[in-house]
Amino acid sequence: MEKLFYCSKLDMTIGKICCIGAGYVGGPTCAIIAHNCPSIQVTVVDLSEERIAQWNSDRLPIFEPGLDDIVKGCRGKNLFFSTDVEKEIIEADLIFICVNTPTKNYGVGKGRAADLKYIESAARMIATVSTKSKIVVEKSTVPVKAAESIANILKANVKPGVKYQILSNPEFLAEGTAVKDLLQPDRVLIGGDQTPEGHEAIQALCWVYGHWVSKDRIITMNTWSSELSKLAANAFLAQRISSINAMSAICESTGADVTEVAHAVGMDTRIGNKFLKASVGYGGISGFGGSCFQKDVLNLVYLCECLNLPEVAEYWQQVININDYQRRRFANKIIESLFNTVTNKNIAIFGFAFKKDTGDTRESAAIYICKYLMDEGAKLHIYDPKVEEKQLITELTHPAISDDPSRVKELVTIHKDPYEAANNTHALVVCTEWDEFINYDYEKIYGSMLKPAFLFDGRIILDHQKLMGLGFNVITIGKRLQRPNVHRPYAQAPAQ
Ligand SMILES: NC(=O)C1=CN([C@@H]2O[C@H](COP(=O)(O)OP(=O)(O)OC[C@H]3O[C@@H](n4cnc5c(N)ncnc54)[C@H](O)[C@@H]3O)[C@@H](O)[C@H]2O)C=CC1
Ligand SMILES: O=C(O)[C@H]1O[C@H](OP(=O)(O)OP(=O)(O)OC[C@H]2O[C@@H](n3ccc(=O)[nH]c3=O)[C@H](O)[C@@H]2O)[C@H](O)[C@@H](O)[C@@H]1O
């Protein structure tokens, strides 16, 4: 049996880990810890009975390639899912706070600041029930100095003999590749107090990750640097996507091809090709989606404003503005191409998840494309291989998307088969880069559509020349396509 890590300053051994929040991060992260650390008992708790029941069932609440096998391999041995939040907190030596931190939709900072109410309630719960010392690890993405608030809540309510150390350990996994990202992380980041007690807590968490991550990939620093590094990393990634999307607009007006531009730029080793080529291929449609980029960049903008750094806030706000612009631009292009009206036209939507290999729809570009088309009265026929019907309807009937749920019902049909979705439509819009879309029988699809048949490839994944050969009018991002053998001169700059 492995010797467990003993923290002399807190007088405890790391034998039990509890994770508060059984979501996209808490579930996979703890499954990987349990898989790699058989001597540690890991329990993931959540207030949602439905979510915990799903984690304990054959159908996990989230789709992540490779996750099923890992969960099934350790569930019931050293990995548990429970709604008994209090009991698990009491027993744990180390607690991950992995709750959601959405953008605030009320009060001060509405629409920009991170809503920390779930973090605070988790911290208060720990403070209320703990009867022994603990290391509390902030894994949720938070504004800088949030760990200080957690520490203040814990210390203000501390029981005699109980001590706490607070660490920041932000998560960098991406959905769809969570298992790979967790098993082979680029880096694990741990921030803590620069005191002997803080260093020991940092070492305890390094020991946990050290079971499968090599030492040179585990970096430690002060808490505030760690918190800011997470926001900075997401802001840099989002900025790259907005940069290439801004270029895509120039490409469409000049005859340049954004794929070629991204290739040329990305060959510079100082710049690198990641999140450039993909941004054209994956994010081209309408900028970035997903639960985090927008929320975290907005969170950074708000932080800058609070710190009285308006120029810095404005700089990062532009990343969001370009993303919004890209979304709108693509929807407008669909409407313009369809002879400036989509009212009562049938439009097939291929893909609703915010990226491939996930069923997550949060902030998905497809939601906004659907919204803009529904606003114009288009009839949508949606197909996604992983998104559940209930989830899809919840997104489209959200008050920010539609103020009339009955109208959504009238305009939207959800299909289980892509060929059915495309049948009798005026246009087909690819919104997610699912691999299966590449190999469909487009000849069959073309044959079943109304003519002229339009195909809008928002992810730049299809063979455009082949599709045009079949008869489709193909429109994509960052490139003007010409029908084979048809000569169209480039647009000239407007006359002075
Ligand atoms: N989704 C992602 O790919 C990534 C997310 N993050 C960050 O990780 C955090 C969690 O994100 P997700 O897992 O996506 O969120 P999620 O919404 O999927 O999961 C959060 C869970 O916490 C539960 N919860 C909230 N308050 C609770 C409480 N007091 N007690 C027990 N359970 C509670 C909710 O019921 C929910 O199931 C966020 O801060 C996010 O920014 C970081 C990296 C990647
Ligand atoms: O904090 C988070 O939540 C996570 O956010 C992103 O992960 P995720 O949102 O799951 O997925 P990404 O692969 O980053 O894609 C985000 C969005 O950007 C788009 N994208 C991605 C890459 C690209 O080059 N261009 C582009 O538009 C995707 O289509 C998607 O809509 C980061 O990649 C993770 O490191 C981070 O941990």
Image: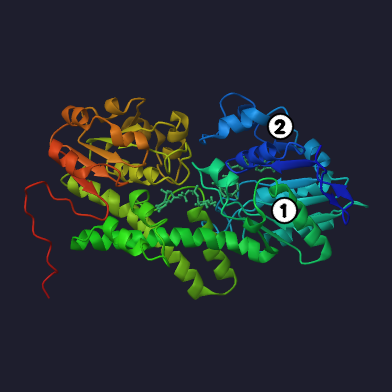
Residue 68, visible in the rendered structure: yes
Q: Which mark is residue 206?
A: 1
193 vs 477: above or below? below
Dot 1: within a 10 Å radius of its alpha carbon, few (fewer than 14), some, or many (20 or more) residues?
A: many
Q: Is residue 298 left or right of residue 325?
A: right
Pair 2/1: label in front: 1
> Which quadrant is home to the C terminus?
bottom left
Q: Are marks 2 and 1 in contact (CB under 8 Å)?
A: no
Between 45 and 34, the residue placed more toward the observer is: 34
Q: Is residue 280 left or right of residue 190?
A: left
Give amino acid for label 2. Phe
Name the image quarter holding residue 46. Answer: top right
Q: Please name the residue that numbered disc 2 is placed on.
A: 80
Name the image quarter holding residue 317. Answer: bottom left
Between 311 and 406, the residue placed more toward the observer is: 311
Q: Residue furthest right?
A: 160
The residue drawn where x is 61% and y is 24% is 57
Q: Earlier in the sequence, mark 2 or mark 1?
A: 2
Name the image quarter holding residue 9. Answer: bottom right
> Which quadrant is home to the N terminus?
top right
Residue 471, visible in the rendered structure: no
Ligand 1 neighbours mark 2 (CB distance < 8 Å) = no
Q: Is residue 248 left or right of residue 282?
A: left
Residue 410 position, x and y percent, is 33, 30
SS for callout 1: helix
Between 447 and 415, the residue placed more toward the observer is: 447
Give amino acid for label 1. Cys
